[in-house]
């Protein structure tokens, strides 16, 4: 995909989309030359609008299962198993909401929305990420947990290598917690790696279901 032109300059737009009760947390950044400039995060009620982006994304990560709906429900896709073999973490269990019945029902809706919305037309720009896997890559295999305040501190410190990330991590949005901002920022870090052609695919030889390559990128 060719870079977006803004003000006569070629700009590459990367982002990440993370499910929350109110809809989808969207973080984005513009790359031009050696600069990396994050935007303020936003909450978008539906995934189709979140994916459109203004300007359009050149690479956008989703922290939700995409591709192979049948196996995604069981957490037994090849990419799920590859991640479990590497980290001991199954993405389906890692994304499980520890909350009341209402929150769980809302997150189930988000998962269903993703499976219904993301298709082969998104293949060139959209990819699936798992925050724990991104953190593992970011810290060179030293950390992958995001379950305690200490883990979040570690992740926040690691993300400081991303220019301007404080603009995202220190944002205050209704219904958005610190953990949400960190998880989305890890996806943004991975999207930057995708654009730089540094991202690693899991598994090495992903299956293609309904025209979409089913994989995790880190």
Image (cartoon, helix red, strand yellow):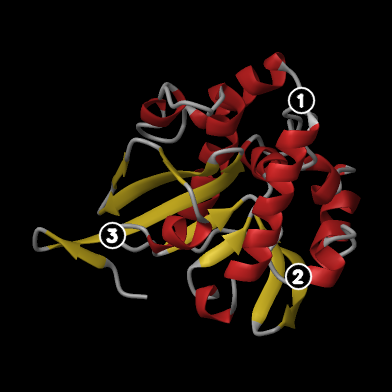
Mark 3 → mark 2, Cα distance in angstroms? 31 Å
Q: Residue at x 35, y 31 (%)?
A: 164
Q: Is residue 154 above or below residue 68?
A: above
Looking at the rendered image, the quarter that the N terminus falls into is bottom left
Q: Residue at x 34, y 56 (%)?
A: 13
| Circle 3 residue | 55
x and y, in percent, of residue 72 in the image: 81, 63
Mark 3 → mark 1, Cα distance in angstroms? 34 Å
Q: Earlier in the sequence, mark 3 or mark 1?
A: 3
Q: Residue at x 63, y 61 (%)?
A: 114
In this picture, residue 178 sits left or right of residue 144 = left
In this picture, residue 141 sits left or right of residue 39 = right
| Circle 2 residue | 204
x and y, in percent, of residue 73 in the image: 84, 61
Q: Is residue 164 above or below residue 128?
A: above
| Circle 1 residue | 147
x and y, in percent, of residue 174 in the image: 47, 26
């Amino acid at each position: 995909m060719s870079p977006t032109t803004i003000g006569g300059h070629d700009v590459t737009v990367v982002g990440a989309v993370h499910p929350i009760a109110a809809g989808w947390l969207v973080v984005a950044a513009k790359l031009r030359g050696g600069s990396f400039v994050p935007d303020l995060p936003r909450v978008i009620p539906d995934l189709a609008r979140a994916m459109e982006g203004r300007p359009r994304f050149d690479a956008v990560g989703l922290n939700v299962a995409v591709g192979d709906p049948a196996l995604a429900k069981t957490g037994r896709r090849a990419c799920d198993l590859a991640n479990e073999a590497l980290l001991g973490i199954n993405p389906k269990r890692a994304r499980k909401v520890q909350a009341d019945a209402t929150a769980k029902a809302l997150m189930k809706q988000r998962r269903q929305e993703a499976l219904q919305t993301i298709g082969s037309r998104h293949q060139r720009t959209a990819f699936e990420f798992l925050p724990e896997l991104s953190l593992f890559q970011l810290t060179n295999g030293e950390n992958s947990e995001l379950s305690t305040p200490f883990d979040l501190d570690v992740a926040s410190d690691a993300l400081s290598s991303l220019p301007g990330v404080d603009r995202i991590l220190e944002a205050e949005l209704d219904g958005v917690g610190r953990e949400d901002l960190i998880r989305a920022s890890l996806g943004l870090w991975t999207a930057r790696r995708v654009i730089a052609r540094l991202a690693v695919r899991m598994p090495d030889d992903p299956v293609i279901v309904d025209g979409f390559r089913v994989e995790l990128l880190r």
